[in-house]
């Protein structure tokens, strides 16, 4: 193989690498958008579950409606309650320190 042939092969390999990197970047962007969509859908669903829970709907009924287990409903509601408590604590701390 000559130096010229090696340089041509190197250029070709770099072009292929660049195409692959472009595909990887496009797939990465696509997947990150899909993840954000999935998270926002799940957050919306979880808020709806929590609203029904606060309205004293039976957990079994909520589970059937959303096609998930009653244990998952309990876990989601506990998580939402903990998050709300954290938010209240943070808000109170910020209010106290802003004066």
Image: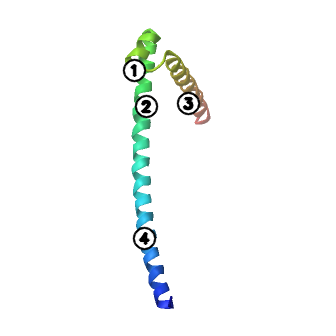
Eye-nearest disc, 2 or 3:
2
What's the mark number on residue 66? 1
Specify which label sits upstream in the sequence, 3 or 4.
Answer: 4
Q: Residue at x 55, y 20 (%)?
A: 78
Specify which label sits upstream in the sequence, 2 or 1.
Answer: 2
Up-down: is 77 above or below 13? above
Marks 3 and 1: CB-CB under 8 Å?
no
Q: Residue at x 45, y 80 (%)?
A: 11
Specify which label sits upstream in the sequence, 4 or 1.
Answer: 4
Write down the residue under mark 2.
42
What's the mark number on residue 91? 3
| Quadrant (top left, top right, bottom left, bottom right) of the C terminus | top right
Q: Residues within 10 Å of mark 1 (few under 14, many from 20)?
A: few
* Quadrant housing residue 87: top right
* Quadrant housing residue 36: top left
Distance from the alpha carbon under mark 2 to that under mark 1: 11 Å
Specify which label sits upstream in the sequence, 4 or 2.
Answer: 4
Write down the residue under mark 4.
16
Q: Secondary structure at mark 3?
A: helix
Q: Residues within 10 Å of mark 2 (few under 14, many from 20)?
A: few
């Amino acid at each position: 193989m000559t130096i010229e042939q090696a340089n041509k092969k190197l250029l070709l390999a770099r072009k292929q690498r660049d195409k692959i990197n472009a595909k990887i970047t496009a797939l990465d962007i696509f997947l990150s958008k899909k993840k954000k969509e999935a998270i926002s859908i799940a957050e919306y669903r979880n808020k709806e579950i929590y609203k029904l829970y606060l309205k004293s709907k039976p957990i079994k009924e909520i589970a059937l409606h959303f096609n998930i287990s009653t244990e998952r409903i309990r876990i989601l509601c506990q998580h939402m309650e903990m998050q709300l408590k954290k938010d209240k604590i943070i808000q109170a701390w910020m209010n106290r320190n802003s004066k």
